[in-house]
Image (cartoon, rainbow, N blue to C red):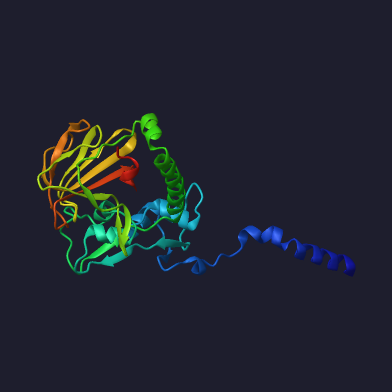
Amino acid sequence: MIFKFIFLLILLTSCENIFYDSYKIIDLNKQIQKDSQLYTVKKGDNLYSISRKFNVSIEKMIRKNNISPPFKIFPKQKIIIPKKRIHVVKKGDTLYSISRNYKTDLFSISNINNIGNINTIKVGQKLFIPSSDKKLTNNKKRKNVVDKKSYKIKKSSRKKTIISTNNSFIWPVKGKIVLGFGKTNPGFYNDGINIKSSHGSNVKASQDGEVIYSGNEIPGYGNLVLIKHSKNWITAYAHLDKIYKKKGSLVKKGDYIGLVGKSGNVNEPQLHFEIRKGKEAVNPMHFLS
């Protein structure tokens, strides 16, 4: 009888992991990072009410806490709340420079802080910065790798690519390139090229499309025109002296859209020109003909 009891005890001990593996206690404190905080669910709470309380998306809370469908939470349950990053505006800051610092875009920052005019931020003002999504970042990195490869192919066989894809862009203005694409100085990255030209020279639409922005509300760019083309291509024309086209205007390749100027953060007449595939800036020199 004693031997049977000992055998049964050993058997139960060896099976402990099988019975209790799904009930292991998880130390949430170890999972909390600097950009997160721990919250104890109260009676009446749900994911929606908590998201409103902490101004975070439900999707991020679900991902952060590995909450499975039907996404129920219970009183006294501890969940991780992603914190929003805060930036205190310093002298010389613009929404554009802040967005570059945090690897986001100025429109996301203005939306999350309910900023109507992006030129109205003040020194000492606290701004919420949209939190970065690691999965999204990784996806973007993979996408960038693919994009860079495709751009190299286009560069090496440029004429063939232009004919097959019909993505040829004409030079918007004639002149000397005074600032190239990419990293030019420490801490500065140029999303396009800057072409020096005579003040008042006509600026042409680089491809057929529709004007989706016409104004001077984006700091640093001065008078700016954005044109959306087929297949989600976008071109940008900044530092203009005058703008000829309004938002919603349809333009043909070669149409005059404005005049070269020095509005924005430049000291001499020039055109800042960008080509984008969706949100990704590409080197215009690979696509201009």
Image position of 235 (left or right of 267): right
Q: Residue furthest front?
A: 176
Q: Position of residue 262 (x, y in %)?
A: 13, 52
Quadrant assignment, res 6: bottom right
Q: Against 120, is 255 above or below?
A: above
Q: Position of residue 213 (x, y in %)?
A: 19, 42
Image position of 251 (left or right of 9): left
Q: Position of residue 68 (x, y in %)?
A: 51, 50
Residue 42 showing in the rendered view:
no
Q: Foreground: 193 or 34? A: 193
Residue 260 showing in the rendered view:
yes
Quadrant assignment, res 200: top left
Q: Residue at x 14, y 49 (%)?
A: 216
Q: Position of residue 197 (x, y in %)?
A: 16, 48
Image position of 180 (left or right of 224): right
Image position of 83 (left or right of 212): right
Q: The N terminus is located in which quarter?
A: bottom right
Q: Against 52, is 211 above or below?
A: above
Q: Residue at x 44, y 51 (%)?
A: 141
